[in-house]
Every structure is written in C-alpha cells, then in structure tokens.
Image (tube, rainbow, N blue to C red):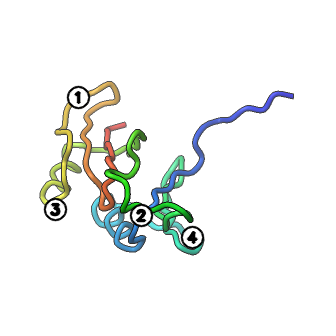
Amino acid sequence: MTVTVSGPDFVALQVRDVEAAAVFYEKHLGLRRAPASPPGAVVFATEPVPFAVREPLPGVDLDTVERPGLGVALWFRTTDAQALHDQLHAAGTTIVKAPENGPFGRMFTFVGPEGYAITAHEG
C-alpha cells in the first residue's frame, strides 16, 4: 500500500499576541473567525485551507529570531491585489515588495503584525 499526501491542510503562524494578530487579519484582510478554535489560537474560516494564529509552541522564543517564518512563502489569494495593497499601505502596514504583475496575477508582499512576510495575489 502506498501512502500519499494531498497537500497542506492547515496553516498556523506562531505569534506573541494572538488577539492582536487576529484583529489585524480580521480588520485588514477581512478574514472571519471560525466557529471554534483550540485554546491559545484563533482559527479563521479560510478556504480551501484553514489559517490560524496561535501561541508559540513550547521552546519557541519569537524574540530570538530576526524574522519569523524566514524561508517560508505564505500567500493569500485576493480579488484585488492593488486595492488590498492601497488599504494596507494607508493603514501603515510595511510593504516589502510593491505591486507587480507576476506568474499568479497582480501581487505584492507586506509584513504582518508579527513580522511574517505575506504575499497577496489575485487568483
């Protein structure tokens, strides 16, 4: 019997302040909280893969890393990358890569509240 994996099924970012991070994703990206979340986490009703922010796992000290998630590419699909960029920029969010047309449509990269680099693209 061969075991197969179909792909990512859940993505969570470890953050210092779960509630502040959750509010950022609600306010600036329009994500909605799922009806239930485990203790120490906020899960969002994203599709096809659920997304969450959570307390750091035991032994993880986010204050000792230069940038959380370094080496991981996290992308969010949006209906209008330019409008999202403009909204985030107006709110003071750091933009690390300006909007451009890429292989997956219009895209840009911003820094989330805990320092994670996140790319938004039209899909």
Q: Which residue is mark 3?
A: 91
SS label for mark 3: loop
78, 65: nearer the viewer: 65
Circle 1 residues within 10 Å: few <14, some 14–19, many ≥20: few
Q: Are circles 1 and 4 on residues that touch, CB within 8 Å?
A: no
Q: Is residue 64 above or below residue 22?
A: above
- Among the two numbered marks 2 and 1 on one chain, the one whose residue lies closer to the N terminus: 2
Q: Is residue 118 above or below residue 101?
A: below
Residue 6 image point, x, y percent: 65, 35
Identity of the amino acid at label 4? Ser
SS label for mark 2: loop
Q: Which residue is mark 1?
A: 101
Q: Which residue is mark 4?
A: 37
- Among the two numbered marks 2 and 3 on one chain, the one whose residue lies closer to the N terminus: 2
Which of pointers 4 and 2 indicates the residue nearer the eye? 2
Q: Residue furthest right?
A: 1
Query: Alpha carbon of mark 4 to alpha carbon of mark 3: how far?
Result: 28 Å
48, 55: nearer the viewer: 55
Which of pointers 2 and 1 indicates the residue nearer the eye? 2
Circle 2 residues within 10 Å: few <14, some 14–19, many ≥20: many
**Residue 96 lies in quadrant:** top left
Query: Alpha carbon of mark 2 to alpha carbon of mark 3: how far?
Result: 20 Å
- Among the two numbered marks 1 and 4 on one chain, the one whose residue lies closer to the N terminus: 4
Identity of the amino acid at label 3? Ala
Identity of the amino acid at label 1? Asn
Query: Alpha carbon of mark 4 to alpha carbon of mark 2: how far?
Result: 15 Å
- Among the two numbered marks 3 and 1 on one chain, the one whose residue lies closer to the N terminus: 3
Residue 121 image point, x, y percent: 32, 39
Residue at 46 percent of width and 60 percent of height: 14
Query: Alpha carbon of mark 2 to alpha carbon of mark 1: how far?
Result: 30 Å
Q: Which residue is mark 2?
A: 15
